[in-house]
Amino acid sequence: MKPLTSLALGLCLLAPPGLGSAALAQGVPALAQDQPYAGLRSPPTAAFPDQALFGSVRFDKLEWNRLGGRDSARWDMEAFYGTDYDKVFLKSEGFYSGRARKFDEAQFQVLYSRLISYFFDVQVGVRHDISPRPSRTYAVIGVEGLAPGLFEIDADAYLSQKGEVSGTFTAFYDLLITNRLILQPRTDIRLQLQRVPDLNLGSGVTDLELGARLRYEFTREFAPYVGVTWDRKLGGTAAIAKRIDEPTSSVYFVGGVRLLW
């Protein structure tokens, strides 16, 4: 028996004399008698959160160091805009020499990013290096995300307009000492498939950089830090550096700020 019809029958049994079931039935719309749930409306459909547009700008490194009597500044920035599934990224990193008043390294990337799993995005796009000279433009494909153990990784492969193949791998981990004091160990590796004499690069693994930065988050958006970095040229790249009287390894202290918008 339909629920609203049962309700009407029950009211008839309780009705005072003279009030018949027909009179009560008039209070129950005919549509409700035939379709007892017709009067109930579904809640409005909300937009899926993963389709909402949002963006962010982050400087993981905005720092200063002094090495061999020379001051230099370094930045590592990424900005994105999009949804949980699809984003457009702008990335940039490099070094600026205060003494020489020039960019030792400066690169910019524009990438399309697509979520392929709960933890990883695949990214494709273009990279342009304005320094060192001669400048180069590369096609880019890579993955970025959270590896087991909560390590954040970024692995990219590049193909230049001259057919040169190279790659980079970055991994870092945020170790919470307190809720605000955070130690971040970081590894950066660069490799080259073939020699590139005009950039003083040999084949194989060209550079290894190990560092640690200790930051204090006054807020998530503002976190000054201090740190130490060790880098070393390897293989054929180290041999080229020795021939042109450049150091093959160095250790230096850094100070800077991590910013987030």
Image: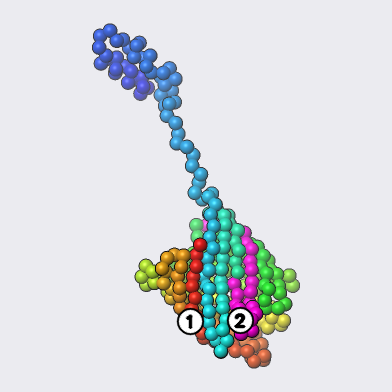
Task: Compare residues 204 and 11 and report the one nearer the observer.
Answer: 11
Q: Which of marks 1 and 2 is in front?
A: 2
Disc 1 or 2, which lies upstream in sequence?
Answer: 2
Residue 152 picture location, percent across and down: 49, 67
Q: Which residue is drawn at 46% across and 68% down?
A: 222
Residue 164 among those drawn in magenta: no
Dominant SS type (magenta): strand
Q: Which residue is drawn at 63% across and 89% down?
A: 246
In the displayed structure image, the side of residue 52 where residue 23 appears, left or right: left
Q: In this view, does 198 lie above or below 32?
A: below
Name of the residue lying farthest toward the top: 18
Q: Name the residue under label 1.
A: 228
Residue 245 picture location, percent across and down: 64, 92
Q: Where, by quadrant of the figure, is residue 22 drawn? A: top left
Distance between the alpha carbons at the discs numbered 1 and 2: 18 Å
Question: Mark 2 packing: few (<14 Cα in 10 Å), some, or many (20+)?
Answer: some
Q: Which amino acid does label 1 sit on?
A: Val
Q: Is residue 232 visible?
A: no
Residue 96 among those drawn in magenta: yes
Question: What segment is highlighted magenta in the picture?
Answer: 93-117
Q: Mark 2 points at which residue?
A: 97
Q: Is mark 1 on a helix, strand or loop?
A: strand
Q: Residue at x 31, y 16 (%)?
A: 9
Give the total of numbered labels: 2
Q: Which residue is drawn at 64% across and 68% down?
A: 108
Task: Compare residues 33 and 104 and report the one nearer the observer.
Answer: 104
Q: Where, by quadrant of the figure, is residue 42 drawn? A: top left
Q: Can residue 167 be seen in this view?
A: yes
In the displayed structure image, the side of residue 34 where residue 82 appears, left or right: right
Residue 91 picture location, percent across and down: 60, 66
Q: Where, by quadrant of the figure, is residue 215 drawn? A: bottom left
